[in-house]
Image: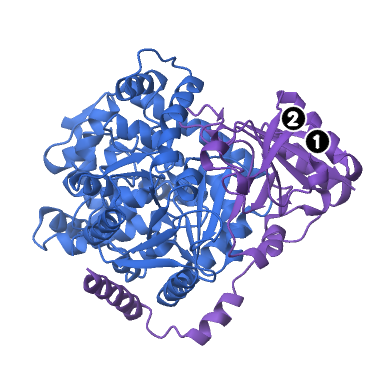
Amino acid sequence: MSIRVGGAADAPAFPKAAPALLDDAQLRKNVRHATDVITQKRARVVEEQRDWQQLRTSASAIKAHTMRYLDEYLLQFETACTEAGGQVHWAADADEANQIIVGLVQKYGGREVIKVKTMTSDEIGLNKGLEMNGIRPHETDLADMIIQLGRDEPSHIVVPALHKNRQQVREIFMQAMGLKELGDRPEDLTAAARQYLREKFLTIKIGISGANFLIAETGGVCVVESEGNGRMCLTLPDVLITVAGIEKVIPAFRDLEVFLQLLPRSATGERMNPYNSLWTGVQPDEGPKHFHVVLLDNGRTRILADEEGRQTLHCIRCGACLNACPVYRQTGGHAYGSIYAGPVGAILTPQLFNMQHAESLPYASSLCGACYEVCPVKINIPEVLIHLRGRLVREQQSEASLEAISMKAVARIFSSRRSFEAAQRLGRLGQWPFVRDGWITRLPGMLGNWTAVRDLQPLPKQTFRSWWRKREKEKRNA
Amino acid sequence: MLDAMNTARAEILDRIRKVNAGAGAQERGIAYQGIERGYQQAAEVSGTVLAELFADRLREYDAQVYETTGADVRDAIAKALAGHGQKSAVVAVALPEHWIPAGLSWRTEVDASTDAMSRAAGAIASCEVAIAHTGTIVVRGSRRLTLLPDRLLCVVREEQIVETVPEAFARLQPFAKDALTFISGPSATADIEMTRIRGVHGPRFLDVVLVRG
């Protein structure tokens, strides 16, 4: 088994990657602006939706139910899709998925493919896999194009290029499209993309997409988008290959009535995004003549096996938790070293890797809970973060590590009042060399990791407990 | 290759079954029925209020709305096209011919190649259902027609408008396996500095002729 999540296995740990990004003033400005705008738009359309909490509850219940019967719903989807003229493939990991897709493109004789934004294809490193086999992939989502043409990495699930501003995009486009002149208004840049891609949409015979939802009842697929590039790739080519994680299946057509209300409001702050495409297998009059779906595991069944972690699979990739997260808003997505950034990335990436990589991510959070509050399918991200921290400590730390020994000592001290108060007295005596102007800014040894990024207030001269005792005593005496 | 795939299929299903041991097919149907659905399903408004809500939501997406009555659909279409100075169009197969303005040069979507459609001045389509709450028009089929030309005009009859998304799905259930496109305003992007730009790859202009009564 070779589980892959883009290049995340080789990415530097979050605490190593973050400082450099925090020093990039332009990047921080771009990220702050984008997340502010989406957060405000989202708040407006969520507030007006009076049954928002009921929708969240239903979405959560539908997802939990689907996970409970996942094998049956996948088989139902396979049968229905096949009956409608589609072909279903199964891939245990990223390599298998790439092999299947490259094999299909070669079978149909394609040298180029057009792609709709799909995080799953980034997860399996599909573009690299295609290029290695002499097949040229064209990203067609505007932001994905900016990333691909600029040889960059996505930094957000929904708006992958939010870390670039208009001048930066202009430079990338002029160079990649060989343009001598181009304005830097978003209108100019969008028009350049429209012109550049229209001919590709009309001539390239193979399209590759992801899926927002696979419908078990009908064997249908739903793709949600804004620009129309998705519809181009889903409608015009002769061959369509859709790659989707196994957790994307939902039981019935009508379940979309829940998710299509939650997803656009959470993702882009719109009542509804401009286009949703639904199709089932091969339609006789219009659309691709050949349709393939690749169902991807790549670590998902292992997440399913973890009772507390499995709710991670409910994610519908709206990105609301990224925009709400005080850590993401400071660092942007690249610090996470994974195409899945932000709070949900911090729980999804390490779990896909079975905690063998990206193990610093569960700590890249202040556990403030903003992510849980905005999650449209009610994933309790803070709970999973704590669960994963616990798993890491249990699985990766030896009994004899300095941290384990200190934690045991602390546990002993905290378990009795007498030893706790003795430790406080000792601390008050021992802290004086470190106190400067009423703050502790640097501690020695391992404790220095704490003070490297935050200042501490010294222990007070009097604790609440001793104050209380003194007060009681004075009352008695009076 | 085929072997590897069958192995993957068996492996994945096997791993899921191990985790979900005891989850039976019979129980599944009952469990699905038991899913709590406390969200709004039925409409709370109707008639003029509903039609106006739909028109308002459309305008918020920068769509042009032309309200008319059954007898004057053709005139409303002519007026909308004149607004763009549009003299030709590709039209949906299902569009009633008596709606097509006199003097308009037109052909149906089945007679137009993809290239021709990409160059066409505009398209005229009808819809299956429309959702007031979200300002959405749902079109069955006509996938190229409602995508390639730069202008899309869609005729929506009042009885096709529902208030809520769940009502729309109930109406669409008989067509669940057809190609359905949900259209909410012109194609758009906010990928560059979160500035909403109208018209990326799909139509830049969306006109709606709303037939009252």
**B198 sits left or right of A154 in the view:** right
In the rendered image, residue A373, in percent from the top left (x then y), is placed at 51, 50
CB contact under 8 Å: marks 1 and 2: yes
The residue sitting at 10% across, 53% down in the picture is: A402
Q: Chain drawn blue, letter? A: A
Density class for disc 2 (Cα within 10 Å; few <14, some 14-19, many ≥20) is: many
Above or below — where is B187 with respect to A275?
above
| Residue type highlighted by circle 2 | Leu
Asked whether the residues under marks 1 and 2 belong to the same chain, the reply is: yes
Q: CA distance from mark 1 to mark 2?
A: 9 Å
Furthest residue to the left? A400
Chain letter of disc 1?
B
To which quarter of the image does residue A448 belong? top left
Q: Nearer the viewer, mark 1 or mark 2?
A: 1
Q: Earlier in the sequence, mark 1 or mark 2?
A: 2
Give the colour in which the image draws chain B.
purple
Q: Is residue B35 visible?
A: yes
**B137 sits left or right of A392 in the view:** right
Residue B7, disc = none
Residue in front for this viewpoint, B119 or B51: B119
In the rendered image, residue A374, in percent from the top left (x then y), is placed at 51, 48
**Mark 2 falls on what kind of element?**
helix
To which quarter of the image does residue B78 belong? top right
The residue sitting at 42% across, 75% down in the picture is: A75
Above or below — where is A218 with respect to A13?
below
Residue in front for this viewpoint, A374 or A250: A250
Residue B101, disc = 1
In the picture, which quadrant includes the N terminus of chain A? bottom left
Residue B81, disc = 2
